[in-house]
Amino acid sequence: MARISKESKDLARQKLIETAATHFAAHGIARAGVDTISNDAGFAKGTLYNYFPSKNDLFAAVIEEACHRALRKYESAEMGATVRDRLRALAAADVEVLRENEGFVKVLVREAMSFRPETYPLIVEHLAPLVAKVVEVLEAGVNEGEIRDDRPPPQLALLFIGLLSLMYVQHWGSGGLWPPLDDVPDLVVTTFLDGAGGRNE
Amino acid sequence: MARISKESKDLARQKLIETAATHFAAHGIARAGVDTISNDAGFAKGTLYNYFPSKNDLFAAVIEEACHRALRKYESAEMGATVRDRLRALAAADVEVLRENEGFVKVLVREAMSFRPETYPLIVEHLAPLVAKVVEVLEAGVNEGEIRDDRPPPQLALLFIGLLSLMYVQHWGSGGLWPPLDDVPDLVVTTFLDGAGGRNE
Amino acid sequence: MARISKESKDLARQKLIETAATHFAAHGIARAGVDTISNDAGFAKGTLYNYFPSKNDLFAAVIEEACHRALRKYESAEMGATVRDRLRALAAADVEVLRENEGFVKVLVREAMSFRPETYPLIVEHLAPLVAKVVEVLEAGVNEGEIRDDRPPPQLALLFIGLLSLMYVQHWGSGGLWPPLDDVPDLVVTTFLDGAGGRNE
Amino acid sequence: MARISKESKDLARQKLIETAATHFAAHGIARAGVDTISNDAGFAKGTLYNYFPSKNDLFAAVIEEACHRALRKYESAEMGATVRDRLRALAAADVEVLRENEGFVKVLVREAMSFRPETYPLIVEHLAPLVAKVVEVLEAGVNEGEIRDDRPPPQLALLFIGLLSLMYVQHWGSGGLWPPLDDVPDLVVTTFLDGAGGRNE
DNA sequence: CATGAATGAGAATTCATTCAT
DNA sequence: AATGAATGAATTCTCATTCAT
């Protein structure tokens, strides 16, 4: 099957990454089998190795793709006027990513939360652009007095993204019962900006 | 005689669970080896199977023990006057658990965050008493107007505990750089109660 | 099968080494399969790995054993009065090793002649005692005027052992036709000491 | 046109054989990869199969070519007056072959010394003309009394060629230290004709 | 002829589990 | 109870070969 178009090769690669994401999400990296992934993607077992030199590289490609997709959504997010609106837009974009790429997001969240020394740096590296997006919004917010100025924006940004992941975990953990994905953007923004404290505190 | 042998049996069991927690935390469930655990605990490979029918059961025992230890600390936590103080006391107790049982907590957090269908129910079940403790405090807070009344306390409690885990993950992920464990209780309570919003919002 | 005697474990190890020697000799290292070796030795495939951490280590053990056996024979060789007799005794001992351990010797010769950078040092190291034995005899011969003194004994010793191997290769290559093993000692010693030159040269 | 394409086809074939010789020599048959060879020769993986039906056939072609080249050199070797000179000329020709085609000779020697039943006959067949050359010289030597007449010339010829290979193996095995190629012709002839015996024997 | 993607048999190695002692 | 040798299914990865383009 020589002279096959560049596109069809990219297609195969994409198909493999997609299938791998699903499997990694469902069973974890260790338990997902390379053979199974390749077969489920419609290829023989060896074919995967024409695209990725090892299981780890395949995993790295999945992470990269996951972050890439998230970043695209973030960048096309409609930005509101207030910091609150802008954060909600980012959160909504993130939820949209989740809806469209559940496998990828699951892998990303699971690995980020598992702090494995082998994968953590990889994730941090690829997550950086997303965090930067949030930092940007928060720094504007600090200037406008909408965000408290006694904590460094990068730390707050990590918190914001962490909160999102937390919601997803609870969503998955409850079998989708609570919180429903529709509620997540508001929930996260409220929690992040307002806290749980009462008015008379 | 019987009593002594019973005690020594419990001792062996405890030793195995303890060692397993360390290994699971360090290498993950899949990569931690049964024989290594048994050897490090001072036994031969096969002995472990006199106490636990399988690796999965050993893992379940570790989770159970982790929750058990956390609960003991929670129950002995000194409770302050205000809701804020009481939450800080619970968070401090949790951090203390972490300090004394890093392996156990790592396994617990990692597993909770990984939402594996096989273990998630187990964790939820064993974590329930902890959540109940927090709910109790929060409900009092609602009555006293210190906690917002538009969100169900159980959901807020899950959020509180999730925030704690989030801090731990960031602590581990940053190699202990940030946040330092000492700062975690204040950080969590502030984040949870006050949010990141500025004063003039 | 715990508490099995130390001897029976050694026995299993020996059996594995023995079988491996046969297979390596017959098919070469690359083509000999670990599974097949283990099965032919009477074990399941995994058992081999309880004794040798890898195929390479198994191979090293075979080489070591081969040299060990050869050395034992060399050391018990009856030594004659003249250098010629002593060399013939060594050659005869070597042939006896060959008769009793054909697999081992084949592996040794094949690897020695293949000068693979990975195995050559191993072989040289293990062959050293044998070479030393020959050097010893040759040095005595130089003193007594029976061996020419214009070439270093270690080089001559390598030549002597190389000639032996050469005979074996021809023996195997001809399907045992020529030279027959019985003739090898005389043949090697004559070739080595006298050369092919005629009397009137 | 046909001629040109025929020539270019031969060229490609030669290039493949040449590259294969290098790879087989460097890594052994089992570890040399078909695609690497094809790529290094300037072709895509599949192209090799337009010239050789299998890896084994490629290997056979290498052996054949190696013998062919050696024969050409032998045939153009300047012949001296005495048997000693003539043998030295053949040895010098052989060394020259080695210098110009190290890969080919390495493969040949290694394979000859490994007595693999699959390749040994092939080698014997192709080596026959070389052996015949040596036999020719030796038979003349017997008539002139320069070569001992109590051993069949064909056997002596095999010994002579074997000695050459032995020197090469030692040369390669010592990393080129000893013997240097320049010394090989003299060394081999002396060893072959005179032996290691002292004068007063 | 050349190409190189696809194939799948095969290889080495791991490891949870069993069970005779 | 404790032991640890034996097991074999499962897993990752390699690579010679095929064949559609």
Image (cartoon, coloured by chain):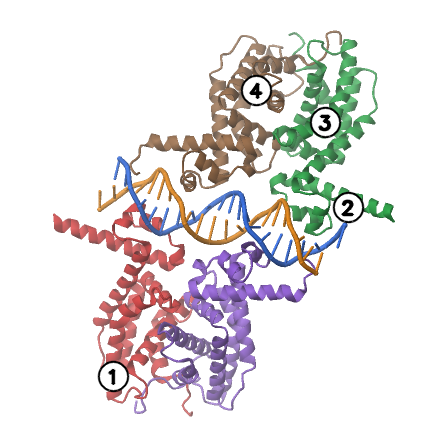
Chain colours: A brown, B green, C purple, D red, E orange, F blue
The residue tagged with tag 4: helix, strand or loop?
A: helix
Q: Residues within 10 Å of mark 3 (few under 14, many from 20)?
A: many
Q: Residue A23 vs residue D91: left or right?
A: right
Chain letter of mark 1 equals D
The residue identified by callout 1 is D139
Q: Which residue is mark 3?
A: B127
Letter of the chain that mark 3 sits on in the rendering? B
Q: Which residue lies at the image location 68% right of the left edge and 46% below the top edge?
A: B37
Q: Is residue A156 left or right of residue B87?
A: left
Give above or below for A68 relative to D17: above
- Which numbered disc, 1 or 4, marks the residue closer to the eye? 1
Name the residue tied to disc 4: A135
Residue type beneath disc 4: Val
Q: Earlier in the sequence, mark 3 or mark 2?
A: 2
| Amino acid tagged 1 | Glu
The span from disc 4 to disc 2 (Cα, nearest Å) is 51 Å
Are labels 2 and 1 assigned to the same chain?
A: no
State the separation of the CA atoms marked 4 and 3.
Answer: 34 Å
Q: Looking at the image, can residue A2 be seen?
A: yes
Mark 2 nearby-residue class (10 Å; few <14, some 14–19, many ≥20): some
Given the image, what chain letter belongs to the residue carrying mark 2?
A: B
